[in-house]
């Protein structure tokens, strides 16, 4: 086992798939000459050349559309957005193009494309650069949505996404790119659509994804000091959602708290809440609770950033309330 940073795990996944399949290429803003805005693609231009690692103008709608067309014609593009905040401009191509190609062509065309990049809060970046779009894209039929929390999962899931014949949305976080994690020396791929129980417990189920997994795991450690044994589930894939793993956990712990950086209205946490109350209501010993981002735009001031985001303290408080402690 080696230790790699999150960015290095992503780079290794892309490079391995590009070596294995000449149809795979990377395109996006600053991915080539600058080695990537967050250095995810560092060294890839030197290895694969300018025809397979392609710098684009600042035109997300334009290069996303080129990618969709290329995927329909037999290639396997990886489209990097500098941030999903900018990719709003490309939603027409993602939602009206990539997601619908297969259905609208009665299966005549596939669209094996990966759209990837960071999202969510990264400090004092204010309202237009701190948003989560996981729930918006996860509600679209035809898309698969992945949001890993660590280097191991990131590499295995990105390799699976590149190999998939459906369009995949891969949501990262710029504050995780330097995170270290163990990566096997041998090749591996993680199945899309499978959540992972990161910590087993008996008293309450904590469900999260992306960088909020850090909050969930730290909260579980803090709760253990109070005698509360939390089970922690990392969704990893948002669509398709692994409801069964969540249900099996809730049937054991009888309580559920969801930690989700997204705005609370119509969030991933809302969908999980519905699925559990529909399929495991009789197992619940307390109401399902959510710890989400604020129902507001993100502000610049540090105290307002702190007030906006889920925290270990907020999660601990909510868990203690559902455990009646």
Image: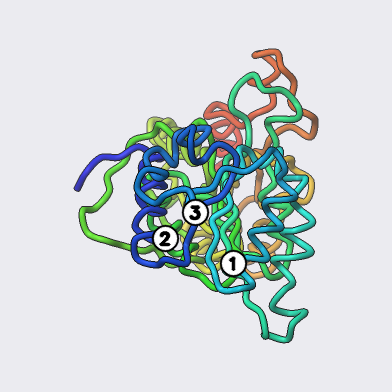
Task: Please give the residue where the numbered disc 1 appears in the rendered image.
Answer: 240
Q: Is residue 57 left or right of residue 32?
A: right
Q: Tag 3 or tag 1, which sits nearer the N-term?
A: 3
Secondary element type, mark 1: loop
Is residue 97 depicted above or below 5 in this figure? below
Residue highlighted by disc 2: 159
Relative image position of residue 77 (x, y in whole percent)? 55, 60
By what rule are the colours in the image chosen?
Answer: rainbow
Identity of the residue drawn at 58% across and 52% down: 79
- Marks 1,3: beta carbons within 8 A: no
Circles 2 and 3, Cβ within 8 Å, touching? The answer is no
Q: Which residue is mark 3?
A: 51
Assign a secondary structure to mark 2.
Answer: helix
* Quarter of the C terminus within the rendering: top right
Mark nearer the viewer, 2 or 3: 3
Residue beneath the point at 75% across and 58% down: 93
Is 191 situated left or right of 276 in this image?
A: left
Q: In the image shown, does 245 or 224 lie closer to the viewer?
A: 245
User: Does label 2 or label 3 sit earlier along the sequence?
Assistant: 3
Q: Residue at x 75, y 30 (%)?
A: 128
Q: Residues within 10 Å of mark 3 (few under 14, many from 20)?
A: few
């Amino acid at each position: 086992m080696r230790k790699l940073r999150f960015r290095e795990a992503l780079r290794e996944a892309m490079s391995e798939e590009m070596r294995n399949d000449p149809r795979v290429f990377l395109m996006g803003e600053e991915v080539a000459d600058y080695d990537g805005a967050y250095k995810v693609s560092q060294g890839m231009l030197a290895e694969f050349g300018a025809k397979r690692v392609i710098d684009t103008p600042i035109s997300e709608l334009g290069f996303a559309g080129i990618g969709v067309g290329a995927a329909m014609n037999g290639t396997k593009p990886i489209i990097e957005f500098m941030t999903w905040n900018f990719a709003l401009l490309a939603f027409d191509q993602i939602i009206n193009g990539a997601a619908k190609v297969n259905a609208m062509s009665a299966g005549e065309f596939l669209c094996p494309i990966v759209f990837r990049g960071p999202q969510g809060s990264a400090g004092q970046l204010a309202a237009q650069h701190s948003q989560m779009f996981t729930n918006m894209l996860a509600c679209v039929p035809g898309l698969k949505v992945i949001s890993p929390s660590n280097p191991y999962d990131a590499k295995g899931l990105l390799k699976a996404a590149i190999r998939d014949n459906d369009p995949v949305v891969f949501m990262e976080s710029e504050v995780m790119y330097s995170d270290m994690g163990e990566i096997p020396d041998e090749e591996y791929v993680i199945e899309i659509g499978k959540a992972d129980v990161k910590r087993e417990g008996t008293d309450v189920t904590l469900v999260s994804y992306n960088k909020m997994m850090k909050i969930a795991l730290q909260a579980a450690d803090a709760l253990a000091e109070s005698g509360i044994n939390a089970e922690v589930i990392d969704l990893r894939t948002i669509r398709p959602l692994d409801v069964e793993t969540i249900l099996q956990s809730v049937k054991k712990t009888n309580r559920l708290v969801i930690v989700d950086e997204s705005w609370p209205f119509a969030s991933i946490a809302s969908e999980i809440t519905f699925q559990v109350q529909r399929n495991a209501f009789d197992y619940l010993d307390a109401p399902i609770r959510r710890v989400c981002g604020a129902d507001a735009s993100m502000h610049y001031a540090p105290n307002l950033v702190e007030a906006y985001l889920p925290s270990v303290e907020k999660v601990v408080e909510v868990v203690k309330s559902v455990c009646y402690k």
